[in-house]
Image: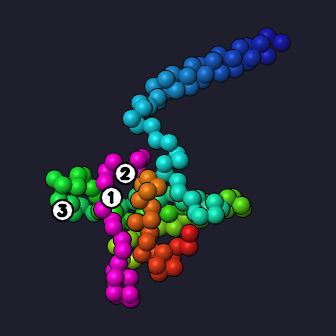
Amino acid sequence: MSKKNTDIETIKKTSESLLETISNADVNSRISFEQFTDESTLISSDTFGTKQMKIKILEVSDEEPPFKWKLGDRVKVTKILVTIRHLTTQQVEESEFDIESIERELQEKRHYTSTNRWVPMSFIKNGYVIKSFHTRLISDAHALDYIIF
């Protein structure tokens, strides 16, 4: 009987120490207001409200931006990860796009390109592009029917 009591006491002590560790981690993991990103600023919806899209930057070019003094700090995006969620079925689609190669393909096939791959640093939050730049980054992929959104 005493063996059971010691086992129960050991379990209680272990659970208490785990709870203390978790509560300390929560306090130390708090972020400042400047680091907080509202999810709604990163997600864009289609016209009918049946799909949502989120774009994560996977790779950027090391090219220096022209007119830095005029247009501010910007990065040239080369690869993105597009995540589309269908709200009616809760199905999630993910695809990686090399914007640079898509831009070249569109120039060869259609003799134009509409992609603006220069994104201001202030429009990138936690590695994701805010929704106002989604159309600019996927416009060539949309023109070649790689994305239907």
Residue drawn at x 55%, y 22% as measured from the top left: 23
Please, is residue 86 above or below residue 148 in the view? above
Q: Kindly indicate the quadrant of the structure image that contains residue 118.
A: bottom left
Local SS, label 3 = loop
Q: Which mark is residue 123?
A: 2
| Outermost residue to the bottom | 109
First of labels 3, 2 by sequence position: 3
> Toward the viewer: 9 or 133?
133
How far apart are labels 1 and 2 at the CA level? 7 Å
Q: Name the residue under label 3.
A: 66
> Residue 137 colored magenta?
no
Label 3 neighbour load within 10 Å: few <14, some 14-19, many 20+: few
What whole-number distance in Å separates the C-alpha atoms at marks 1 and 3?
A: 12 Å
- Of the residues shown, which amino acid type is indicated by label 3? Pro
Give residue 141's quadrant in the image. bottom left
Q: Position of residue 142 (x, y in %)?
A: 48, 75
Q: In which quarter of the image is the C terminus?
A: bottom right
Magenta stretch: give its range: 104-127
- Whether residue 53 is visible, yes or no, is yes
User: Which structural element holds mark 1?
Assistant: strand
- Percent across and percent down for residue 17 are 59, 19
Where is 118 relative to 28, above or below? below
Identify the residue position indicated by label 1 in the image. Answer: 119
Q: Are marks 1 and 2 in contact (CB under 8 Å)?
A: yes
